[in-house]
Amino acid sequence: MKKHVDLTAAYQPKDFSFRDMSQVAEILSRYPKGKQRSATMPLLDLAQRQVAQDGALANPPYGGWIPRAAMDKIAEIVDVPPIKVYEVATFYSMYNLEPVGKYLVQMCTTTPCMLCGSGDIVKTCEDHLGIHMGESTKDGLFTIVEVECLGACVNAPMVQVNDDYFEDLTPESMKQLLVDLKDGKDVTIGSQKGRRTSMALSGTTTLLDQADKLGVKKAI
Ligand code: FES
């Protein structure tokens, strides 16, 4: 997905400062003296999470994203030209460089998810929220974006909402998830079909079960 970046947009705040400098100091302390530029990625993440915390209390709400002022502040902290921070932030999809909804729904449409019905999941989201891929709802609650494989193919189709994965989705469970998030209800993270991690849908299996079924003698 091509990331949209506008460093001079009207929504860009003029200033940014970290609320808790002790967190910044802790991140910097993870790296050897003189190598503070290695802290760029965790500092970007910290900035994005701070914006998300502010956004959760705002009306309308918004989600975590990284203003240009935050990238400039990070460049100052790690002592590199701002472009070095922009390069990192624009490369990784986990950094949002424009405002997003409180719930950022990242929809995997790579081959395994596509074969398991991600097209229907995307359509369900678009129809239910009345927006298209890359857009946000007017109430500030949801943004939907298309992403490449999120590494949960065995539980396809799946989406990531903020930090959490929702797997084994059906159009019905996807719609229910959106409704519950909007209503502020607790939601079940992981498989929506009740399986634990990526165990078989029929329940737990072990090689010993298989050996029993096949009549293979156990070594011990
Ligand atoms: S293809 Fe969707 S998680 Fe891998």
Image (cartoon, grey):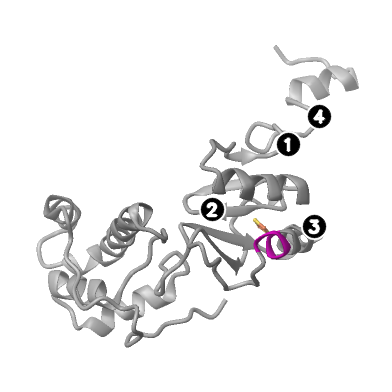
Q: From where the camera sits, is residue 155 visible?
A: no
Q: What SS does tag 3 mark?
A: loop
Could you tell which of marks 3 and 2 lies nearer the N-terminus?
A: 3
Residue, disc 1: 193
Q: What SS does tag 4 mark?
A: loop
Whole-percent x, y for residue 83 in the image: 27, 84
Say if mark 4 contacts mark 2, CB within 8 Å.
Answer: no
Say if mark 2 contacts mark 1, CB within 8 Å.
Answer: no
Res. 117 mark: 3
Residue, disc 4: 202
| Membership of 1 in magenta stretch | no
Could you tell which of marks 4 and 2 lies nearer the N-terminus?
A: 2
Could you tell which of marks 4 and 3 lies nearer the N-terminus?
A: 3
Q: From where the camera sits, is residue 5 visible?
A: yes
Could you tell which of marks 1 and 4 lies nearer the N-terminus?
A: 1
Which amino acid is tagged 4?
A: Ser
**In the image, which is nearer the foreground, mark 4 or mark 3?**
3
- Looking at the image, residue 158 sits to the left or right of residue 16; the answer is right
**In the image, which is nearer the foreground, mark 4 or mark 2?**
2
Mark 3 and mark 2: Cα distance apart in space: 18 Å
Which amino acid is tagged 2?
A: Val
